[in-house]
Image (cartoon, rainbow, N blue to C red):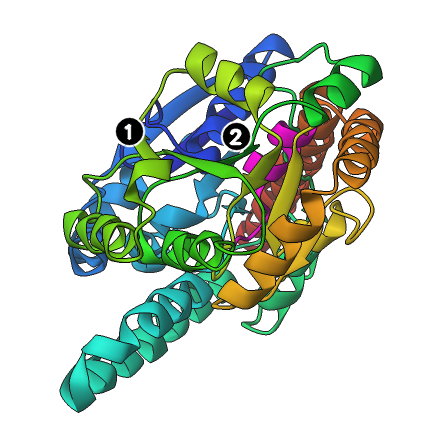
Amino acid sequence: MRVALVLAGDIESESGGFYYDRRLRDRLRERGHAVEVVSLPRGSYRERLAPNLRARGLADRLSGFDVIVEDGLAHPSLLCANRRLDTPTVALVHMIAWRARTAEAAARAGGTGLGGRLRAELGRRGVAAVERWFLRGVDAAVYNAETTRRDAAGLGGPDRNTVAPPAGDRFDPVTAASEIRERAETGPLEVTFLGNVVPRKGLDALVEGVARLDGTGVDWRLTVVGDRSVDPGHAESVAKAADAAGIGDRVDFVGRLGDEAVAARLRESHVLAVPSRYEPFGMVYLEAMGFGCVPVATTAGGAGEFVRDGESGVLVSPDDPRAVARALRDLDDRDRLAAMGTAARRDYEARPGWPETLDRVVVFLEAEAARGADDRAAGERGERGERA
């Protein structure tokens, strides 16, 4: 099977979606399939629409494959080309873009004024329209979560689809229950945030939440692991908020870290807190659970599909610093922390690993390629019959 894997940007980029893409590329090759990565411009949303002006050329570039897999991030670039293709197209949807845009708009709404809010709303509706056009133009889809599938169905996503959630075994940690219990009994409550410092990820709500712990008797430390250069203005405002609340000395911004350093940080952490305004799946929560690190996750997205609220983690509503503070205060009960950490580890172990997840995708793609071959053969037979 000859597969085109189409994406926006560099497949070696650091993000959960690109990590999934890389694992899928490698698994397809391990299964004997030929994979060509087709990288389209990343840029702004408007810039990603530009390839539609050259749709014929892009369609020609994608000819000759048995199946075309299209990372959902590239969806604005593929609207017109897809309608020229007779090869099966399969969307690989890591995130519903209009939901992410809505979350970003909500995070920024307080300081934008009426004009800014109107532009944000028009932008959100525009993204929803483009995404709807894309999803209605593909033959099939692979989703990372049931939540993503439901959201896509509301936009007219294809009837043929499957859910193949990411695995959390990138670090393959070996963490015994005794280690988790011992860690729970020691030191201040070690809280880690892991993700790009952008409004959608909710670091501002987390900082306000930990600030509310002052006077409660909870001794805590917060380590922020993530790129501050994606949205420097937001990163600066969060740091200033921490200083203004008098907690700057307990919030450590360490920037981006390599995998080994991230694993070391999770191994030392009691809690992984990322109260996002929207997290389509939340692979970072699952990765933390592998270390017996208790996730404080968001209700907005797919985390509830694997984080058992109050048992193996805590689910909090977006933009609710009080809920974040309550969750952390409760986790400072070290017996509760140890019990939830061991439950988190058990839930992690029960999840499918990457080979199982990706083999499901490979089988799905093989079926789509076979369907396309049958359709083309039937078309050729029909043409021969008409000529006869």
Q: Residues within 10 Å of mark 1 (few under 14, many from 20)?
A: some
Q: Amino acid at mark 1?
A: Gly
Please report the residue visible at 66 percent of the width from the left and 65 percent of the height from the top: 150
The magenta span reads 279-290
Report if the CB atoms under discs 2 and 1 are less than 8 Å apart: no
On the image, numbered disc 1 is attached to which residue?
Answer: 255
Picture coordinates of residue 79, whole percent (x, y): 34, 59
Q: Looking at the rendering, in which quadrant would you find the N terminus?
A: top right
Of 280 and 270, which appears nearest the observer?
Answer: 270
Question: What residue sits 75% from the left and 14% below the top?
Answer: 179
User: Residue, x 65% and y 20% (percent of image)?
Assistant: 169
Please tell me how crowded label 2 is: few (under 14), some (14-19), or many (20+) other residues with Cα within 10 Å: many
Question: Is residue 287 rendered magenta in the image?
Answer: yes
Q: Earlier in the sequence, mark 2 or mark 1?
A: 2
Residue linked to disc 2: 20
Q: Amino acid at mark 2?
A: Tyr
Q: How far across and down, in percent of the image, does residue 371 sit? A: 68, 42
Q: Is residue 325 visible?
A: yes
Residue 386 located left or right of residue 35: right
Q: Nearer the viewer, residue 191 or 289?
A: 191
Question: What mark, if any, has residue 97 been given in the picture?
Answer: none
Label 2 and label 1: CA atoms lie apart by 23 Å
Q: Quadrant of residue 107?
A: bottom left
